[in-house]
Image (cartoon, rainbow, N blue to C red):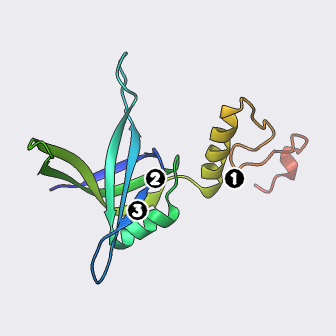
Amino acid sequence: MNKVILMGRLVRDPEVRYSQGANPIAIAKYTLAVDRRFKRDGEPTADFIPCVAFGKNGEFVEKWFKKGQLVSVVGRIQIRSWEDKNGNKRYTTEVITKEHYFAESKHKAAQNTVNENTQNKNSRDKSAPEDEEFYTIDESAEDEDLPF
């Protein structure tokens, strides 16, 4: 069985090309930065995993995936080999994705983009809510006033 499930952030916007022929298909290539669970001194904190999506999956990636977005993908590992221009045999390992999922809300993704942009300017809006699902609680409410 060859099945891979990954969750990580896109390192950059996907690169999409279309095949030649009567019925061109989309080929989307992107890299996911997947955090490592355990870290040792001197080791990287993430693995950068190349992914490829074909056809309708590639079109979905082209339309909806953006740099920095947290996504989850399901696919399989594929190892390809070829000869470079010097005659050396080269290998690459990539994940051929079959399923794509958003792993954060649109609000959180937009907030991460804003934070990335403002972080470069060393400023941040402290009044912005951390998550739109939360709201301030009226501290003056008495237990008798609660419906439960």
Q: Is residue 83 above or below residue 64?
A: above
Name which residue type carries label 1: Glu
Name which residue type carries label 2: Val
Looking at the picture, how far across and down is residue 53, in whole percent? 33, 62
Q: Residue at x 87, y 51 (%)?
A: 145
Looking at the picture, how far across and down is residue 122, in whole percent? 71, 29
Relative side of 87 to 109, left or right: left
Label 3 or label 1, whichever comes before in sequence order: 3
Contact (CB < 8 A) between labels 2 and 1?
Answer: no
Q: Real-space Cα distance between discs 3 and 1? A: 34 Å
Q: Residue at x 33, y 74 (%)?
A: 25
Q: Which residue is mark 3?
A: 16
Question: Does dot 1 land on a helix, a strand or a loop?
Answer: loop
Q: Nearer the viewer, residue 29 or 102?
A: 29
Q: Residues within 10 Å of mark 1 (few under 14, many from 20)?
A: few
Q: Which residue is mark 2?
A: 71
Q: Quadrant of residue 96?
A: bottom left
Contact (CB < 8 A) between labels 3 and 1?
Answer: no
Q: Quadrant of residue 36?
A: top left
Q: Residue at x 64, y 51 (%)?
A: 110
Looking at the picture, how far across and down is residue 103, in whole percent? 49, 53
Q: Residues within 10 Å of mark 3 (few under 14, many from 20)?
A: some
Q: Which residue is mark 1?
A: 133
Label 2 or label 1, whichever comes before in sequence order: 2
Q: Nearer the viewer, residue 2 or 144?
A: 2
Total label count?
Answer: 3
Q: Real-space Cα distance between discs 2 and 3? A: 17 Å
